[in-house]
Image (cartoon, grey):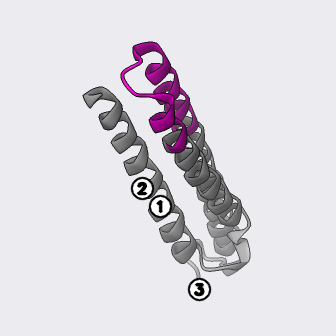
Amino acid sequence: MGIFGDDNMQNERLDALEGHIRVLTETVLANQVDLAGAWIAIIGLQAQIDEKVSAEEIDPTIGALNDQLGEARDQLAKASNAATESWATMQSGVRDSFETLRESVREASDRLKRG
């Protein structure tokens, strides 16, 4: 017997909670993608304003960051469709993808600051 005295009711509540957590997770991941995109744009603008880095140096960096952002978006799309797959495994891959993107953005920003 479920904790509410009704297994069906318990299952419905657990399903609702799981759905809510997935929506929240997808929202957070979407925000991370948007934030990374904004940082990439800021790095490009900062490079143009400061003229500390030549266009030949910054263009490949921005291109690589945009490629990683695209990969992160792909992972986000996969996470959104993960209802039938192992959620924990999918989330691990998404977190790894975002951490790689975050680190690349930090490195590009640091490189720009060092000029």
Nearest the viewer among 86 and 8 is: 86
- 74 to the left or right of 46: right
Q: Is residue 46 magenta?
A: yes
Query: Disc 3 to disc 1, how far (Cα)?
Result: 36 Å
- The region drawn magenta spans 36-60
Q: Residue furthest bottom?
A: 1
Q: What residue does disc 1 label?
A: 95
Pointer 3 and pointer 1: residues touching (CB < 8 Å)? no
Q: Earlier in the sequence, mark 3 or mark 1?
A: 3
Please state the total of marks drawn on the protein image. Answer: 3
Q: Earlier in the sequence, mark 3 or mark 2?
A: 3
Percent across and percent down for residue 25 are 57, 53
Amino acid type assigned to the residue bearing label 3 in the image: Met
Amino acid type assigned to the residue bearing label 2 in the image: Glu
The answer to whether one can see residue 28 in this image is no
Amino acid type assigned to the residue bearing label 1 in the image: Arg
The 10 Å Cα crowd at callout 3, few under 14, some 14 to 19, many 20 or more, is few
The 10 Å Cα crowd at callout 2, few under 14, some 14 to 19, many 20 or more, is few
Percent across and percent down for residue 98 are 48, 55
- State the SS at label 2: helix
Vertically, is 36 above or below 20? above
* Residue 50 falls in image quadrant: top left
Q: Is residue 74 magenta?
A: no
The 10 Å Cα crowd at callout 1, few under 14, some 14 to 19, many 20 or more, is some
Q: What residue does disc 3 label?
A: 1
Q: Please name which of the two marks, 3 or 1, marks the residue nearer to the observer.
A: 1
Vertically, is 97 above or below 53? below
Q: Residue at x 58, y 44 (%)?
A: 63
Q: Residue at x 61, y 58 (%)?
A: 71
Q: What residue does disc 2 label?
A: 99
